[in-house]
């Protein structure tokens, strides 16, 4: 009897006893920041750039009061957090909430369930996330360890993208003229562009290390429009986690990280003090037709000698080598190395073995006609657009989740998003002559617990390009990927249903396809979009409605009373 009680208590403890509530206040403020000899009033959180690091443990409740002290509308998204039955706290503007307007505040309230590792938070309205972002660290439960030896130190490495101009002006001008937005002036590591830009060497990130230790770098790509190759000269990295899920460890010299992805890597330092400084550098992977910021951000890895005689002495500098800018072959090889740990001790989800609903989505660029009596600077005098299944998704002027919850969908959205392309073509061959997209706020309704498979196919319209697709409210399993056109007869045979990687963001390969699966077990309205903000702005976005289940524990609760109004 006593033994039984003891067993029950100890098996319950990890679930409840160690969880706590973490309170944060995020003041959205503007402060002057100088980079590349250019000072601008930059909007960020609590006057820090990048913003504060949010730390929680798996199982914790997180409560963040966001107070808007700037003239712009704002929302914050907790990127990758599952938001189980807390869709009101997800953050994408006009999808799950109306913006927090000047002088208003809103308290985000959610728990961290079944996730550990690195995620990040960022603004989710227009291009505000260019400067409003910061790391989110989810530690294992107090009584749990990592599936690898505890590192000596853990360091967030956040990649960003810097414009001398106001990013809001950049995107608003582009949407007006129909042209591509002006490219950024620099990439940054933890807000610092580093020595390879003019007037910037004092703004260099330095990682000081001791020999013979293991450091865990929490890599976050918060850049707006660019996938990045990252490498540290003369050091290899061990990848151990992706999007807050552990993976089977593997060694690499170069990491590719798309906007919206996060990954933890272990860095083993050399056993001695080398007389050298090692550059860490990142620059883009790009295959499209347009212009892009082809610059390199760099920081230093420095061995800090305790009695530092040699610090004033000139040291050798080693530079890393990165793959060619358009190395799709490297990217394909690299992304296929990610495998979930697939161990019941460390992962909570399993890949759906059967599928209830199948979708085939084309993702890519297109055009929309130039309004009468205006001139446009997009392709052939049109405006750039982007779409999923040729639908360029229009955001409503109210929030979709509210319209759904209060049954006011009339005039806000329809539920007829196409499950397949309406006009099939050779997606990776010669593009069709008609490139105009259609516009609409069209959604897909999924009954609770539907097992979903989505094949996403890149198109060659205006250039084949990788699109990092991000799904809110779920992790998905990447069961297959390939180049060229997806073949529904042949390709499923090679799907990995054993240990596919579980992520929230994955690059649809340039000129190829990816197949993902997820279980629709989270009621609400969930955004899915390209994490290149330029493509999202052009309409490469859509949303799913996941209906309530029958049980009380399967229903979306009503909104908090302070939910902003439009
Ligand atoms: C910010 O910079 C602007 C112009 O560069 C200047 O007018 C203003 O006083 C600065 N504000 C603060 C708080 O330093
Ligand atoms: C938040 O908004 C409420 C309701 O408008 C207001 O009473 C409160 O003072 C605000 N708090 C802050 C810190 O702005
Ligand atoms: C957060 O949500 C929980 C569960 O709905 C609720 O009990 C709690 O009062 C909320 N806290 C705040 C500060 O809103
Ligand atoms: C990018 O810049 C590098 C030099 O930094 C140059 O060698 C390369 O040709 C450029 N690539 C493109 C596509 O502009
Ligand atoms: C370190 O390297 C620099 C540059 O190669 C050299 O000038 C210096 O003598 C070296 N110092 C030691 C202690 O080896
Ligand atoms: C990459 O770019 C180089 C130089 O522009 C070009 O020669 C090569 O064919 C390209 N490779 C791929 C895979 O597109
Ligand atoms: C990718 O893998 C293939 C097959 O293993 C190999 O032939 C190719 O060289 C690799 N490409 C790169 C860039 O590593
Ligand atoms: C375009 O210009 C023509 C001629 O000036 C005018 O008749 C027409 O009303 C204009 N159309 C719009 C939509 O402004
Ligand atoms: C450009 O647009 C014109 C007029 O809409 C059309 O006739 C022409 O075929 C287009 N050219 C290309 C290359 O798309
Ligand atoms: C599609 O286009 C590609 C590239 O041009 C070509 O290799 C392939 O044969 C085409 N497929 C079909 C079914 O026409
Ligand atoms: C596109 O237009 C060209 C020239 O007008 C024509 O030769 C070609 O057949 C058209 N292609 C398609 C796929 O309709
Ligand atoms: C802010 O959001 C409100 C509500 O959607 C909207 O009416 C207003 O135009 C927005 N303001 C700006 C500056 O975008
Ligand atoms: Cu895209």
Image (cartoon, rainbow, N blue to C red):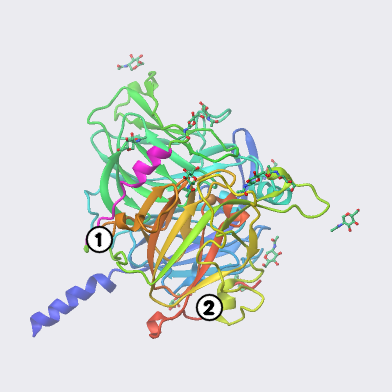
Is 376 on the left-hand or right-hand side of 263?
Answer: right
In magenta stretch: residue 335:
yes
**Residue underneath mark 2:** 559
Dot 2 lies on which element? loop
Please state which of residues 409 and 31 is positioned toward the viewer in this rendering.
Answer: 409
Using the rendered image of the protein, determine whether residue 52 is visible from the camera's viewpoint: no
Residue 353 image point, x, y percent: 29, 66
> Quarter of the image containing the C terminus?
bottom right
- Quick one: label 2 or label 1, which is nearer the N terminus? 1
Residue 251: numbered disc? none
> Quarter of the image containing the N terminus?
bottom left
Please state which of residues 299 and 408 is positioned toward the viewer in this rendering.
Answer: 408
Task: Indicate whether 187 appears above or below 102.
Answer: above
Q: Residues within 10 Å of mark 1 (few under 14, many from 20)?
A: some
Please state which of residues 47 and 502 is positioned toward the viewer in this rendering.
Answer: 502
Residue 206 image point, x, y percent: 42, 35
Using the rendered image of the protein, determine whether residue 533 is visible from the camera's viewpoint: yes
Please state which of residues 419 and 198 is positioned toward the viewer in this rendering.
Answer: 419
**Residue underneath mark 1:** 346
Please report the bounds of the magenta region as a residue range: 328-343
């Amino acid at each position: 009897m006593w033994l039984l009680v003891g067993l029950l208590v100890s098996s319950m403890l990890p679930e409840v006893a160690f969880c706590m509530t973490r309170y944060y206040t995020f003041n959205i403020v503007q402060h002057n920041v100088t980079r590349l000899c250019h000072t601008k009033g930059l909007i960020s959180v609590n006057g820090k750039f990048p913003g504060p690091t949010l730390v929680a443990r798996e199982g914790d409740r997180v409560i963040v009061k966001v107070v808007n002290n700037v003239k712009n509308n704002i929302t914050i998204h907790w990127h990758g957090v599952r938001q189980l039955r807390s869709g009101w706290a997800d953050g994408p503007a006009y999808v799950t909430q109306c913006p927090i307007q000047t002088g208003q505040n809103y308290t985000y309230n959610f728990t961290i369930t079944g996730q550990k590792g690195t995620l990040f938070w960022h603004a989710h309205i227009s291009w505000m996330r260019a400067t409003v972002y910061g790391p989110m660290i989810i530690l294992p439960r107090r009584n749990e360890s990592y599936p690898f030896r505890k590192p000596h130190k853990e360091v967030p490495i956040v990649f960003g993208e810097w414009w001398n101009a106001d990013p809001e002006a950049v995107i608003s001008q582009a949407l007006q003229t129909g042209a591509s937005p002006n490219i950024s002036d620099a990439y940054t590591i933890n807000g610092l562009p580093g020595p390879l830009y003019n007037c910037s060497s004092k703004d260099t990130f330095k990682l000081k290390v001791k020999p013979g230790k293991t450091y865990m770098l929490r890599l976050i790509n918060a850049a707006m429009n660019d996938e990045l190759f990252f490498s540290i000269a003369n050091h290899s990295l061990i990848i151990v986690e992706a999007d807050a899920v552990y993976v089977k460890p593997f060694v690499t010299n170069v990491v590719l990280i798309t906007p919206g992805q996060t990954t933890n890597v272990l860095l083993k330092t050399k056993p001695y003090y080398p007389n050298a400084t090692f550059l860490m550098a990142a620059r883009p992977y790009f295959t499209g037709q347009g212009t892009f910021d082809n610059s390199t951000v760099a920081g230093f890895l420095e061995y800090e000698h305790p009695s530092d005689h040699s610090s004033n002495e000139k040291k050798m500098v080693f530079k890393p080598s990165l793959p060619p800018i358009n190395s799709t072959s490297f990217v394909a090889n690299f992304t296929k190395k990610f495998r979930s740990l697939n161990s019941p001790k460390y992962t909570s989800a399993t890949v759906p073995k059967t599928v209830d609903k199948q979708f085939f989505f084309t993702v890519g660029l297109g055009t929309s006609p130039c309004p009468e009596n205006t001139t446009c600077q997009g392709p052939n005098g049109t405006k750039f657009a982007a779409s999923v299944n040729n639908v360029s998704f229009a955001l409503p002027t109210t929030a979709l989740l509210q319209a759904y919850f209060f049954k006011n969908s009339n005039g806000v959205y329809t539920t007829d998003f196409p499950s397949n392309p309406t006009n099939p073509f050779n997606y990776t061959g010669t593009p069709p002559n008609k490139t105009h997209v259609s516009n609409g706020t069209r959604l897909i309704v999924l009954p609770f617990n539907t097992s979903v498979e989505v094949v996403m196919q890149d198109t060659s319209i205006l250039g084949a390009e990788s699109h990092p697709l991000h799904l809110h409210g779920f992790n998905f399993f990447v069961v297959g990927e390939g180049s060229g056109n997806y073949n529904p007869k042949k390709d499923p045979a090679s799907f990995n249903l054993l240990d596919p990687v579980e992520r929230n963001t994955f690059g649809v390969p340039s000129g190829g396809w990816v197949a993902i699966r997820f279980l629709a077990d989270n009621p609400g309205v969930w955004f899915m979009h390209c994490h290149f903000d330029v493509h999202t702005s052009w309409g490469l976005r859509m949303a799913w409605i996941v209906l309530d289940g029958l049980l009380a524990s399967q229903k979306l609760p009503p909104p908090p009373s302070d939910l902003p109004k439009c």
